[in-house]
Amino acid sequence: MNYTTKTTEYDVKRIREDFPILKREVRPGVPLIYLDSTATSQKPQVVIDAMDAYYRQTNANIHRGVHTLAEEATAAYEHAREAIARFISAQSTREVIYTRNATESINLVAQTWGRANLNPGDLIILTEMEHHSNLVPWQILAAEKGLRLEFIPVGSDGLLDLDVYRELLQLKPRLVAFTHMSNVLGTITPAKHMIQMAHEAGALALVDGAQSVPHFKVDVTDLDADFLAFSAHKMLGPTGIGVLYGRESILEAMPPYMGGGDMIRKVFLRSFTPNELPHKYEAGTPAIAEAIGFGAAIQYLNQVGMNSIAEHEHRLTAYALERLEEIPGVTVYGPEAEHRGGVVSFTIEGIHPHDVAQILDGDGIAIRAGHHCAMPLHDKLAIPASSRASFYLYNTMDEVDALANSVYKVIKWFK
């Protein structure tokens, strides 16, 4: 996309031209309708080109070399970090740690801050709508250190019960960790308010931003978050790279996560001194091309405009809710459109979600089916699985209509 300023009118047709895969037919005469961006997003040509250019012209390891290629690669790698820091309004690039994904970011906090600061009997508050990535690391740590885990329940409206949260905060937790946007219900949680409440109770707050950072403006300074985790591949970037944002003072006090090259300042046979932030947590040769691709994705999102993207997705989601809820036998899960991001999970009475997804694939429609790495939430909803359609900046109203028409076809086929 060759924008020089942010768009004033959302031109989804123009945006779609930037994504090569959207021109694909999944079989002759059946064009791709990609409604699975919550799992991973598609990539614009500029991201593909940025990674290709690195390998063709600049391929070298970073930080340690003084030759031209090494200096160019280092500059591009760190320029991407600067772009990411600005994107989330971090105070410093020292607060932006490259990881493999949001999952590793959360595990990093659990295995460094958690191990160093939590003691038997300490409480961590989570929610019933968490992705496994924000459940299992804390379960592992709780088993190891004798911690307590408590959960903010999800109401029938798809929203968190903040009255129960207030009660749990009276138990003096050490950490509150929660998703900013549910990958199943689409629920956008009141993160700023929840963080403020956590701080007033003396707890730190970790936000799983895997589903929020790609879709609407997330400002860590405004949120006052202590930690924020997100992944590049859900926001037009490549797989294999993510970010942990951490408050600088907390990161400084935490022990290193892994040992090896680049995370050290000095090494002796029996001891070492860790490197300064952010390199303290980035052992070994990193995902250099992926970081450069991530930076290109950030630039693309900035050019389109995060507010424009959020507004477009809201229109799509509201329309999708309207279309799906009109279909007999369909149950849609989650809150009303005003409290929801671009995710719609649903079931069809008497039809397994895997069958739904397979039949929709026959029409070229890519959706997700299963528990979406949120098995406890599905247990809460009393369903084994759900079908999930998710939207991003390149989806259209016509694609929502195609989804609804195919759901009608599924019901007709089975009944």
Image (spheres, helix red, strand yellow):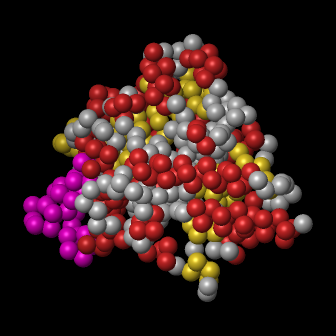
At a point 76% along the width and 53% down the height, the residue shown is 326
Identify whether 142 is placed above or below 208. above
Image check: 380 left or right of 300? right
Q: Is residue 252 magenta?
A: no
Residue projecting furthest to the right: 415
Q: How many marks?
A: 0
Residue projecting furthest to the front: 9
Q: Quadrant of the N terminus?
A: bottom left
Report the span colored magenta.
Answer: 54-82
Image check: 77 left or right of 372? left
Q: Is residue 57 magenta?
A: yes
Residue 327 is situated, as x and y percent measured from the top left of the image, at 78, 56
Residue 188 is situated, as x and y percent measured from the top left of the image, at 55, 38
At a point 72% along the width and 66% down the height, the residue shown is 405
Q: Quadrant of the C terminus?
A: bottom right
Q: Looking at this view, is 231 or 25 the one in front?
A: 25
Q: Looking at this view, is 415 or 143 the one in front?
A: 415
Residue 76 seen by the camera: yes
At a point 24% along the width and 76% down the height, the residue shown is 56
Residue 40 seen by the camera: no
Q: Quadrant of residue 255?
A: top left
Identify whether 110 is placed above or below 85. above
Q: Quadrant of residue 161?
A: top right
Residue projecting furthest to the top: 170
Residue 275 is situated, as x and y percent measured from the top left of the image, at 22, 41
Q: Looking at this view, is 163 or 77 the one in front?
A: 163
Magenta: main secondary structure: helix
At a point 60% along the width and 66% down the height, the residue shown is 398
Q: Quadrant of residue 225?
A: top left
Residue 232 is situated, as x and y percent measured from the top left of the image, at 41, 55
Q: Looking at this view, is 307 or 237 the one in front?
A: 307
